Image: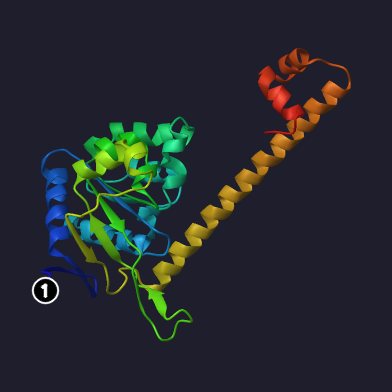
Amino acid sequence: MVNKYRHKYNDIEIVIDYNLYADLILFYDDMVNSQMDMVLVIDGHEGTGKSFTARKLGALLSSWSKLPFGVDNIHFDIDPYIESSESGRKYQVNILDESRKVVNIKRSMSKSNVKFTNFLSENRDKNQAHILVLPAVHDLDPYISYWRMSMNIHHIKWHINSPKSLSGKTLDRGNYCVYDKTQLRKYMMNKDKYGKYTYPEKPMYNGKFDGQDVFYDYEVNQYEKKKQLERARKYDETMAAHDHIEQRNLLIRTLIKDGKNYDEVAKLCKLSESTIRAAVRGKK
């Protein structure tokens, strides 16, 4: 039987495997006593319980620090995340849910990515815990995954028999693996050899998060509402940007149709000639 660490939080008991507790308390001690911060990355397939795990670990770390924890500790975009961290206290827990959208390696030079990596590089003296939730640690900017990550908790898909399901199987949430960081980095740095989203063959240990959510029902509702509002805001911004591009391209095509050449239109619109040509071809 796997040894368990048990911790009372409000009126529930947080139960985690002892191997994970041993790692967490080591990084927590470094944060408190060595002027370090703590960066946990929780990844895995959709629906495997990553956000549930983030909340549970956030509550555990906050209770060790005797700090409050709730929906205000969870963010879905970079600006409110940084604002909350910068104005927060030492040992505060900050959760960036769905963080692939702002710290993706494919967007390494994007404004949000640069802002976040700069923030992490300058924020260590705050001695805070950062929990990043995303589908794959491989998608993180290398500065974070190679040099700043304390540990990766990788959630795995695990199906169990269920007579109530049409398929006879149901997804059992909360199962995870923890890999040796050196081995994991080797796989991430050699994607051509091992594959883009490959993890080491054997974990150091595995386990399962289960039990009661650390949020009450009304807090879960607040969390879902906050998530929906952020999604709606991003959608509105994306649509506005799309409309702006369409209007710009229409203007460019009209100017070309009226007899102006590409160079003249580029100067008028303060854009590169290649952008003008792409607009005429119907590309963004």
Task: Check the image and name the residue furthest to the front.
Answer: 193
In-front residue for pair 170/70: 170
Percent position of residue 39, x then y: 26, 45
Percent position of residue 211, x then y: 27, 74
Q: Is residue 103 visible?
A: yes
The residue drawn where x is 35% and y is 31% is 118
Identify the element where label 1 is drawn. Answer: loop
Residue 163: image quadrant is bottom left
Report how many numbered discs are placed on residues in the image: 1
Looking at the image, residue 283 lies above or below residue 256:
below
Q: Is residue 48 rendered to the left or right of residue 211?
A: right
Looking at the image, residue 243 lies above or below residue 269:
below
Q: Quadrant of the N terminus?
A: bottom left
The residue drawn where x is 27% and y is 61% is 176
Percent position of residue 2, x then y: 12, 70
Look at label 1 and name its amino acid. Answer: Met
Please rate how many residues cluster around mark 1, counting C-alpha atoms within 10 Å: few if below 14, some from 14 to 19, many from 20: few
Task: Check the image and name the residue furthest to the right.
Answer: 258
Figure colour scheme: rainbow
Percent position of residue 42, x then y: 32, 54
Task: Check the image and name the residue furthest to the bottom.
Answer: 163
In-front residue for pair 1/39: 1
The residue wearing badge 1 is 1
